[in-house]
Amino acid sequence: MSPALITALLVAGGAAEADGAALDAETRRAYATVLSRHVKDGRVDYRGIEKKSLKLLDGYLSKVAEADLPEGRNARIGFLADAYNALVLRSVIRHGRPRSVLDVKGFFNEEKHRVAGRDVTLDALEKKVLNPFAKDPRTHFILVCAAVGCPILEGRPFAGTDLDARMEKATRRYLAGTTGARRSGSQLLVSKIFDWYAADFGGKDGVKDFILPRLSGKTREGLGQKPDIGYIDYNWTLNQM
């Protein structure tokens, strides 16, 4: 194999095959193109995807549907997170870009999607496939539910990248934003994610242990070691441009 061809494969993400990538480089590149073209600062140009990149997105999801799950931990988490986020994008478009995905009955818990040979809802993909395998609550900050209140969608896939570093960065970024965590006097207000999925963080005390070391200094000041926790109203408005 020529040096030029080796370089091309590396750029396309072919090196990730060594980590057990479930999809070929061309398929991964298609999804990467969708994200790079239509995601900016966490907001999504759904209309642009529909007009210019729907074929790429559908092609990617058709391969996701029948792919083998990667064996490696990070490779599998990356594959499943990308699949989840891509399915959310496609579902939003299919339903005509609703004001909120909550306006679509069964968006998360009834509509079925095919992933790695299984028909699953988005809820099942998250709660029965990804989370029990990952056993890492930071996955909650790389799954994007198409709402302003959720973690932002990044402009590149997770598969084939330094997943651990990106999960940590995504977690800290979310906590640094007003939808993730903020101080109100001596009380710490946090996203409802920490209420809905408290068990994944080890309960209410586990939530505090998870959040406090990751807060910025300004937010952390004046909270004490065991601050009272309150919750921020979740903004379900569609995360579109």
Image (spheres, rainbow, N blue to C red):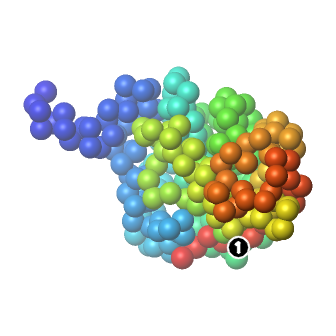
* Residue 100: percent from left, percent from top: 72, 71
Give the image quarter of residue 55.
bottom left
Question: What is the tally of numbered marks visible in this picture?
Answer: 1
Q: Residue at x 70, y 73 (%)?
A: 237
Q: Quadrant of the C terminus?
A: bottom right
Left/right placement of residue 46 relative to residue 196 reads: left
Whether 229 is drawn above or below 208: the answer is below
Left/right placement of residue 14 relative to residue 129 reads: left
Q: Quadrant of the N terminus?
A: top left
**Is residue 42 or residue 129 the one in the foreground?**
42
Residue picked out by circle 1: 237
**Is residue 57 or residue 8 the one in the foreground?**
8
Q: Residue at x 80, y 56 (%)?
A: 223
Q: Residue at x 43, y 40 (%)?
A: 161
* Residue 102: percent from left, percent from top: 78, 66
Left/right placement of residue 171 relative to residue 200 reads: left
Say whether residue 158 is visible. yes
* Residue 134: percent from left, percent from top: 65, 32
Element marked by disc 1? loop
**Is residue 225 or residue 68 the one in the foreground?**
225
Say whether residue 83 is visible. no
What is the crowding at mark 1: few (fewer than 14 residues within 10 Å), some, or many (at least 20)?
some
Q: Residue at x 42, y 27 (%)?
A: 19
Q: Amino acid at mark 1?
A: Thr
Whether 180 is drawn above or below 18: the answer is below
**Is residue 104 or residue 149 the one in the foreground?**
149
* Residue 11: percent from left, percent from top: 26, 43
Give the image quarter of residue 150.
bottom right
